[in-house]
Image (cartoon, grey):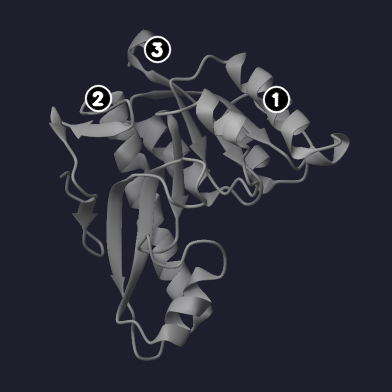
Amino acid sequence: MNAEKRLPIVVLVSGSGSNLQAIIDDAQADLPVDIRAVISNKADAYGLERARKANIPTRVLEHTAFEDRSSYDQALIALIDEYQPALVILAGFMRILTPSFVSHYQGRLLNIHPSLLPKYRGLHTHQRVLESGDKQHGASVHLVTEELDGGPLILQVTVPIEPDDNEASLAARVLTQEHIIYPTVIRWFAEGRLSVTNGVIEMDGVALDGPKLMTFNQTTAL
């Protein structure tokens, strides 16, 4: 595909980068994006190696080199903007972002969270859902706002909880679905089906009044 027709994105990672790998794999197939850079706050993040193997530029901006969160985020904004992305993708970027950072990328900053938001915001979602005795779990792709894991929802997938599930087995099953729904949402943006105006998400020209829903192992387009 002609590079000019690909949506330019930058991906932020802190760790393994399995969701990054899913995006890379789809981009090498037919996802119309140009991954202009992968940026990490940790030099040893394996996500950087995934990017290098795919010949994607990598940058490291370690937060430990900055006095406070605000100064780090301002430097991160400057680094990201060198690549002029249409979307900034958080793929396991383990940083709480400042309001100024979120505001700078309003409407074009995406995150994926391993729960059916608004349930189980924050960490340890798989453990918490098992302790609560829920019958289903899942993952959510959402716009990022100043509220932790609280931005407008775009797409969710439900994952059934099996009687013999433990935290590891449930986490693994949810992760396989994350690898489907995150590239799906990015594709919607790249194909012009999804847009954000003044915080309102529109899908195919119609305002979303809630997230699109996919069921476990559903792979067909919505």
Camera-nearest residue between 148 and 180: 148
The image shows a total of numbered marks equal to 3
Classify mark 2: residues with Cα within 10 Å, few (<14), some (14-19) or many (20+). some
x, y percent for residue 70: 73, 33
Q: Which mark is residue 191?
A: 2
Q: Amino acid at mark 1?
A: Gln
Whether residue 135 is situated above or below residue 172 in the rendered picture: below
Report how far apart the C-alphas of labels 1 and 2 lie in the structure.
Answer: 30 Å
Is tag 1's residue or tag 2's residue first in the polypeptide sequence?
1
- Residue at coordinates 52% horizontally, 78% vertically from top-left? 127
Query: To which residue does mark 1 refer?
Result: 74
Query: To which residue does mark 3 refer?
Result: 3
Classify mark 3: residues with Cα within 10 Å, few (<14), some (14-19) or many (20+). few
Residue at disc 1, secondary structure = helix
Q: Horizontal placement of 88 versus 77: left or right? A: left
x, y percent for residue 177: 35, 58
Q: Quadrant of the C terminus?
A: top left
